[in-house]
Image (spheres, rainbow, N blue to C red):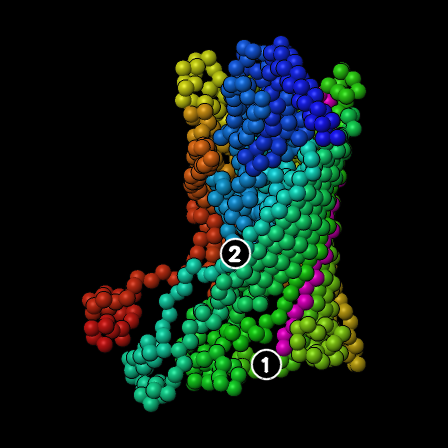
């Protein structure tokens, strides 16, 4: 048996050797078979990559798994790998049978598709001022909100956190403030129009790209709501290839980056006694009292939540083939605030599913997001709130947080009368509030390609889509009974609860024709859109809760029937729109775009319900001209752009053109004083109210140097907003709330500049960007006799602290301007009125006091 086995091995070896010799001879006759896998910089396989034998037209493409195979002749020396958006790679063969390639993104891809509203356009053909932020850029910074991730990414866009509260609203300003009302841009998320509050459910990791339409010509396709700019958000979708599972996470801690310098105990006592002495009064604190005061509290440290955690987890599943693909993700985010541990917090759980089906003539897809957001917060940006940091800066350091018996201490205990100031840590313990938001957001679309039916219809497509959102915002609060001092107490506890419901939907139908005639390329589209936003709310409150903790603070646990209150509200907003756009280019060198949109809104009366918003823009890729051929070694790309357009603004709330009837007016009639409930108009109507219009001119250029490793973009803009939507100033004798009118104009003018550098140095990727902008804001006209508007409330009766005045920036501060402190007797003597009398005869300088 051993001999038979040994003989079998010899026969097998001989056969294998014969096969290798024959195979080698065949290989020499057929050439070399080379195989391999192409991946991106993250290790993901890349289907559809072109693999070409250099110097020939022979090649292949990678399959759905990123693999390829190609037969070479003896004289073939190199392979070239290329893919849109990536740097081409040339590999020398040198007899290798397996060549694996990793492709790197190009610094700037002129063939890259840019979202322009109801379609895509090559970056090289864009004639407006559009900034794009990619998913890679969005992923940096570990931000809670999508708009936070835009900070510092593009010129002319200012991102401002309204407070340090986790989950709080983030303000976005594009090229200055052009309105006296809401200056937030319009957000479009996968086709659904919304505002900055409506994108809190989005995880930055789910974003494919964000395009910011900065000039009026680019934004005109959204007409009525685009006066403050447009932010287009496109979420990720599935692709071809094997199912991939990715997991990303980060964990970190947050701390205040600095604290204000405040007095310690000894400094506070010294200054208090000096102040009393300078006023001719006895010391507030005797030596014996100072020796017994052992507390030295830093109230900032007591308010801050050091090492506040911030965590994010996301797992994503994606895959598919040419016929069907999917992407599913689960995201969990939690952030604690750096003030008030346990009282300031934001938590978000999001599930996303997108699917796409290609059936040839028709492509259909859907996207759904389910989100749950939970937040707790304290009063932010309110210097009167007893929970604010202002309290921590003003509470004396000699006051402890608690006494040894656990009771709260207050300045009043130490004979320090401070009406607005008390123990802020104690007030934080009495703050109880939570908001839970439940959202379902989705869209479905069908794209019909008529070119699949007949060659005569090639380039003709029709897309219909439906987007919708349903949200429930449930909030509740609990105020316990407490007694800290004379001005900070409640005699009875109370509970409140409110539910807000939002239903939004949007329907769009777009017909597009894309055709190339020789060197001429034309894309034309016409479309229709309808939108509705509904809102209703209900809430109530009640006092005397039988429990004393927040967990059991519900209205049905309160027992005082006379304290019951209830409220409710309703809002309804609709829009109907028609739009069209023509894009033309000759040889990809000369470009022209024209847009018109007509919008009708329920927020305006019948006489001015519709508005028209046109735009026109042009571009010139001058670097493609023959006379620029000598610059190719250093100037890779050059384009000039110019645009003009008009956009609208309707952000005034519902039914503001008319006067709705309000309830709550009570009067008593008869001997028995019978109560009757009446109704009165809530404001003066203005049926002539019309759109606020923003008109903008933009001139800019885009340059690329050294194979587009270095890029420069610059724009000059001049934006004028007219027919302000404002509430008319009116005296009280009018007897009712004044109407909303069109009454002013403002100009924003300035420059945007972006300088970028992208380059691979070995495995190191450098992506640096320098951005800057200027903006001059000036009120041009206010249509009243005073030529000014006042607003703002500084408290303590300080109204009208900000103003809009012709010739000045919008929202300048207005107040008393002082000349400083008297430095000598000569200045006191020179301070006289028109009659030559001393205004402050008792004033003394430091040297004389």
Q: Which residue is painted at 63% across and 67% down in the image?
A: 433
Magenta-tinted stretch: 459-480
Report the Cα–Cα distance between label 1 and label 2.
Answer: 36 Å
Q: Which residue is painted at 32% across and 85% down in the image?
A: 283
Q: Which residue is painted at 69% across and 52% down in the image?
A: 371
Q: Label 2 neighbourhood size at 10 Å, few (<14), some (14-19), many (20+)?
A: few
| 587 up-or-down from 554: above or below | above
Q: Label 1 neighbourhood size at 10 Å, few (<14), some (14-19), many (20+)?
A: some
- Indicate whether residue 59 is drawn in magenta: no
Nearer to the camera, 571 or 673: 571
Which x, y percent locates residue 64? Answer: 68, 29
- Where does label 1 land, which residue? 482
Which x, y percent locates residue 539? Answer: 72, 66
Q: What kind of secondary structure does the magenta stretch mostly adopt?
A: strand
- Indicate whether residue 469 is drawn in magenta: yes
Tag of residue 252:
2
Nearer to the camera, 411 or 448: 448
């Amino acid at each position: 048996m051993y001999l038979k086995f040994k003989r079998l091995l010899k026969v097998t070896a001989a056969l294998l050797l014969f096969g290798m010799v024959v195979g080698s001879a065949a290989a020499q006759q057929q050439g070399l078979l080379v195989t391999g896998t192409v991946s991106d910089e993250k290790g993901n396989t890349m289907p559809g990559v072109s693999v070409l034998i250099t110097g020939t037209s022979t090649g292949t493409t990678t399959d759905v798994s990123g693999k390829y195979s190609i037969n070479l002749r003896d004289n073939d020396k190199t392979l070239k790998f290329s893919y849109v958006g990536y740097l081409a790679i040339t590999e020398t063969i040198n007899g290798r049978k397996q060549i694996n390639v990793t492709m790197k993104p190009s610094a700037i891809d002129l063939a890259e598709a840019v979202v322009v509203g109801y379609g895509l356009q090559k970056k090289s053909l864009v004639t407006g001022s559009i900034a794009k932020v990619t998913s890679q850029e969005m992923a940096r910074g570990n931000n809670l909100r999508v708009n936070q991730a835009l900070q510092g990414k593009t010129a002319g866009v200012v991102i401002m956190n309204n407070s340090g509260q986790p989950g709080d609203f983030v303000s976005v300003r594009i090229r200055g403030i052009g309105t006296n009302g809401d200056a937030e841009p319009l957000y479009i998320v996968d086709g659904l129009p919304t505002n900055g509050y409506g994108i809190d459910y989005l995880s930055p990791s789910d974003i494919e790209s964000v395009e910011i339409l900065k000039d009026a010509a680019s934004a005109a396709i959204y007409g009525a709501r685009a006066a403050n700019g447009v932010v287009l958000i496109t979420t990720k979708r599935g692709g071809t290839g094997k199912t991939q599972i990715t997991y990303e996470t980060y964990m970190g801690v947050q701390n205040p980056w600095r604290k204000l310098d405040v007095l310690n105990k000894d400094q506070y006592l010294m200054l208090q006694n000096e102040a009393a002495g300078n006023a001719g009064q006895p010391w507030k604190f005797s030596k014996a009292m100072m020796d017994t005061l052992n507390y030295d509290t830093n109230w900032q440290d007591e308010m801050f939540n050091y090492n506040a955690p911030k965590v994010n987890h996301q797992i994503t599943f994606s895959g598919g083939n040419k016929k069907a693909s999917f992407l599913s993700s689960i995201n969990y985010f939690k952030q604690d605030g750096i003030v008030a541990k346990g009282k300031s917090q934001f938590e978000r759980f999001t599930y996303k599913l997108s699917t796409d089906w290609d059936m040839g003539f028709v492509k259909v897809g859907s996207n759904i997001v389910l989100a749950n957001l939970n937040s707790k917060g304290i009063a932010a940006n309110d210097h009167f709130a007893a929970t604010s940091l202002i309290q921590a800066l003003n509470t004396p350091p000699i006051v402890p947080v608690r006494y040894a018996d656990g009771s709260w201490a207050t300045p009043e205990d130490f004979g320090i009368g401070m009406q607005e100031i008390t123990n802020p840590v104690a007030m934080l313990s009495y703050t109880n509030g939570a908001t839970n938001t439940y959202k379902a957001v989705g869209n479905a679309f069908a794209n019909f390609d008529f070119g699949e039916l007949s060659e005569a219809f090639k380039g003709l497509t029709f897309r219909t889509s439906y987007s919708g959102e349903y949200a429930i915002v449930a909030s509740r609060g609990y105020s316990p009974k407490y007694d800290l001092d004379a001005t900070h107490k409640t005699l009875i506890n109370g509970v409140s609860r409110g539910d807000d419901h939002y239903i939004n939907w949007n329907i769009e139908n777009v017909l597009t024709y894309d055709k190339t005639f020789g060197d001429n390329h034309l894309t034309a589209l016409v479309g229709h859109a309808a939108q509705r936003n509904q809102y209703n709310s209900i809430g109530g409150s009640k006092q005397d809760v039988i429990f004393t903790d927040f967990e059991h603070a519900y209205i049905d646990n309160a027992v005082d029937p006379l304290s019951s209150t209830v409220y409710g509200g309703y809002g309804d907003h609709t829009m109907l729109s028609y739009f069209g756009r023509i894009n033309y280019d000759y040889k990809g060198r000369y470009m022209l775009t024209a847009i018109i949109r007509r919008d009708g809104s329920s927020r305006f009366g019948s006489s001015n319900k519709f508005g028209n918003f046109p735009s026109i823009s042009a571009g010139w890729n001058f670097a493609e001209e023959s006379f620029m051929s000598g610059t190719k070694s250093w100037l890779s790309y050059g384009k000039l752009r110019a645009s003009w357009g008009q956009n609208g603004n309707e952000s005034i709330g519902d039914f503001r053109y008319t006067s709705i009837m309000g309830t709550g007016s009570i009067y008593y009639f008869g001997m028995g004083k019978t109560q009757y409930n009446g109704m009165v108009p809530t404001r003066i109507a203005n049926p002539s109210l019309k759109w606020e219009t923003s008109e903008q001119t933009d001139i800019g250029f885009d340059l690329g140097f050294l194979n587009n490793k270095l890029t420069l973009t610059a724009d000059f803009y001049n934006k004028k907003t007219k027919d302000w939507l404002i509430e008319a100033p009116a005296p009280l004798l009018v007897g009712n709330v004044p109407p909303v009118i069109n009454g002013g104009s403002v100009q924003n003018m300035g420059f945007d500049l972006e300088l970028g550098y992208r380059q691979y140095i070995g495995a190191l990727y450098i992506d640096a960007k320098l951005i800057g902008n200027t903006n001059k804001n000036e009120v041009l006209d206010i249509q009243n006799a005073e030529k000014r508007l006042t607003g703002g409330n500084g408290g303590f009766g300080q109204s009208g602290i900000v103003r809009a005045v012709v010739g000045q920036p919008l929202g300048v501060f207005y107040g008393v301007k002082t000349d400083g402190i008297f430095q000598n007797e000569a200045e006191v003597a020179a301070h006289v009125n028109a009659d030559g009398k001393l205004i402050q005869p008792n004033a003394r300088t430091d040297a004389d006091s």
